[in-house]
Amino acid sequence: MSGLSATILGCEGPRLSPDEARFFAEAQPWGFILFARNIEDPTQLLALTSDLRAAVGRDAPILIDQEGGRVQRMRAPYWRQWRPALEQMAQAGPARAARAMYLRARLIAHELREMGIDVNCMPLADVARETTHPVLLNRLYGTEPDTVIGAGRAVAQGLVAGGVLPVLKHLPGYGLGEVDSHLSLPRVSATLEELMQVDFAAFKPLADLPLGMTAHIVYEAIDPDLPATFSRDLIGMIRSEIGFDGALMTDDLSMGALPGPIGERAARACAAGCDLILHCDGDRAEMALVLADTGALSGAALARCERALTQRAHPAPLDIAAAEADLADLLDGEVYG
């Protein structure tokens, strides 16, 4: 037993209250995740990340979704405002896309590490389709597995070079999702053959990444009853067929795709084989229920989480001006959104 809860938790606002600090000190989540509600300016954000770690008495990982486009919690005027990934991929073209995505991720990592944030929830290895829901579509990297693999690897390398751990998502693939899983449960009727040839194929070469995130989505060919986050069969395929052996977290447990009370959701995800339970909205009453039904981080899950954290490293040197100039050249000057 580690003394850590198998959770990643959000906080209420831009400053940590004494009551919240005491709550987290007792709860001992493995890590924290930040959203736009937690961010005002660089001075405030750096204080918040410091206070979160002080509350738990250790160098806990702090996560964020800083993809670019619609999903970026840190925004102008203090941080770069990125265009959606799919737009940047198209702008760069096939020959330049991987290098452009590397530089984008490297510059994002630099901004994150300056603020004390050391995990970013990307790359996205979901393969886009014409029917992919708009909530996801322009966040993706392409419509072919090889394109997605190349961009995903470049993003991961850019983050790691900047001292930030990547999170591979949304395992085992959300590209066929036609509804918004924040609101309701997507169901995919594709054959196992299509899933293996396209969706799972995009994740396999990235399965060495240290952290991953599940998709709240039903794949009827594998488990017609349960979303991946709750399905032993699908978690088993993520481990065996895709070969992912990193620490596997749920997507946000509060999302509308998942049925049942919040504590029950945590228990079902743990029983299915998820290593970490992600709860994002900062509601302490809900977090208490999640903590009660999650339990301590232990065994193989603990080992995977510890192994992931050994990959946190100091950022490599970066000439920011040169990186920005290189990226601008690759994108014909159209870099920021």
Image: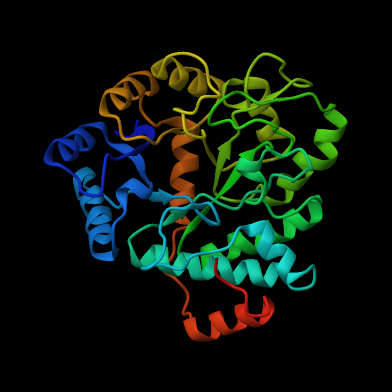
- Residue at 49% x, 65% y is 81
Along the line of sight, the residue nearer the viewer: 292 or 12: 12
| Image position, residue 120 (x, y; %) | 48, 53
Q: Is residue 319 visible?
A: no
Placement of 323 over or under 52, stated as above or below: below
Q: Extreme left residue here?
A: 18
Total label count?
0
Question: Is 312 left, or right, of 198 in this rendering?
Answer: left
Question: In the picture, residue 198 is in which quadrant?
Answer: top right
Placement of 330 over or under 187, stated as above or below: below
Question: In the picture, residue 186 is in which quadrant?
Answer: top right
Chosen colour scheme: rainbow
Q: Is residue 141 visible?
A: yes
Along the line of sight, the residue nearer the viewer: 5 or 258: 258
| Image position, residue 261 (x, y; %) | 42, 14
Along the line of sight, the residue nearer the viewer: 24 or 142: 142
Along the line of sight, the residue nearer the viewer: 325 or 336: 336
Q: Extreme right residue here?
A: 193
Location of the N terminus by quadrant is top left
Location of the C terminus by quadrant is bottom right
- Residue at 45% x, 34% y is 276
Question: Is 25 left, or right, of 96 in this rendering?
Answer: left
| Image position, residue 216 (x, y; %) | 59, 29
Placement of 7 over or under 154, stated as above or below: above
Question: Is 153 left, or right, of 161 in this rendering?
Answer: right
Question: Is 191 left, or right, of 99 in this rendering?
Answer: right
| Image position, residue 25 (x, y; %) | 20, 37
